[in-house]
Image (tube, helix red, strand yellow):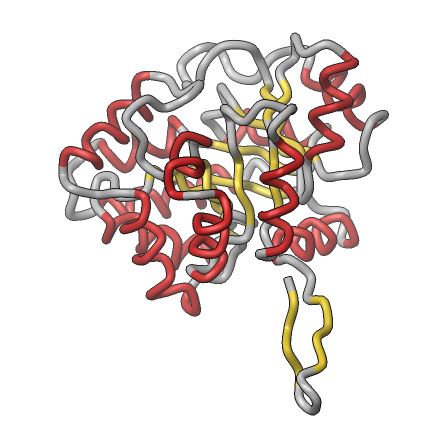
Amino acid sequence: MWLIVDPASRMIPVMNRIDATFQDLRAGGRKGLMPYVCGGHPSLGATIEVLRGAADAGASLVEVGLPFSDPIADGPVIAAAMHEALESGVVPGGVLEAIGGVRGDIGVPLVAMVSYSIVHRIGVDSFCRQASACGIDGLIVPDLSVEEAPRLSEVAGSSGLVISLLVAPTTSAERAERIVSACTGFVYLLSRVGITGGESGGPGAAIGANVARLRGMTDLPIACGFGISTASDVGMVVEHADAAIVGTALVRRMDDGGEEDAGARGLSFIRELSTGL
């Protein structure tokens, strides 16, 4: 990311908000919480309410899922949320525009979880420019192959965005090396194999070993998701990783009780999760 400074239109580099956040966390000996919200579910208003209040509720970053008809690696709760968002007329561009309209009120970095199909359909250059202009700081692209990653990483970087790819516990060492070398910002480590969902027994028991393996490959922060649904789970994860990602449990909490108070329920749950830090 670059900032134009007068006089003579001099350009100086500006640190990405994600990099700055992890740098601050490490400097203070602290760990982060990255809640996930499905953009537009149960309403765009609820999404924006959570984003505006996330910092005060204890979140360090927020992941925003852009609705997609065939979500990758997502379990039934998030898949249903995306389907309902699309059925109500919410589209990825609408989520980005809504965020852009209130970005100055949001006190945390924002990471868009987006299928590469969406990026490719819009156009890599156009999508990255639009996302950056709306205040997105990074992209998690779950279905991006490591072979295609360098092109997207280069274009994203020129727009001031970082790129994070997924590493599973079963990923071979050779392939994991290639994946982490394509990441910027942070690496997304799956705490266990399978799909998202907080109903399957929490993070995997081997999380410490899996984080240690990645530490030997990269200095980037490691954020861990999948199966994390309680403050206790968060605490278990951040004993090893730099941040814990909570998605399904938050989407379920926001969906349980009607649209009107969904944002407030989401923020209350983030506060509860943050006690695990």
Judging depth in this view, the residue of 143 and 39 nearest the camera is 143
State the count of labels. Answer: 0
Q: Quadrant of the N terminus?
A: bottom right
**Nearer to us in this view, 171 or 20:** 171
Q: Residue furthest bottom?
A: 7
Q: Is residue 229 above or below residue 258?
A: above
Rendered location of residue 97, percent (x, y): 32, 57
Measured as percent of width and height from the top left, residue 10 is found at 71, 81
Where's residue 64, x and y in %?
41, 42
Residue at image x 69%, y 31%?
241
Residue at horizontal 41 percent and vertical 18 percent from the top? 197
| Residue 236 shows in the view | no
Q: Is residue 88 above or below residue 8?
A: above
Residue at x-position 38% and y-position 28%: 249
Is residue 27 visible in the rendered image? The answer is yes
* In the rendered image, the vertical position of residue 260 relative to residue 174, given as above or below: below
Q: Is residue 54 left or right of residue 9?
A: left
Quadrant where the C terminus lies? top right
Q: Would residue 213 be found to the left or right of residue 98 on screen?
A: right
Residue at the image position 60 percent from the left and 28 percent from the top: 148
Task: Between residue 121 and residue 90, name the one nearer to us.
Answer: 121
Q: Is residue 54 left or right of residue 92?
A: right
Instruction: Name the quadrant containing residue 20.
Output: bottom right
Q: Residue furthest right?
A: 216
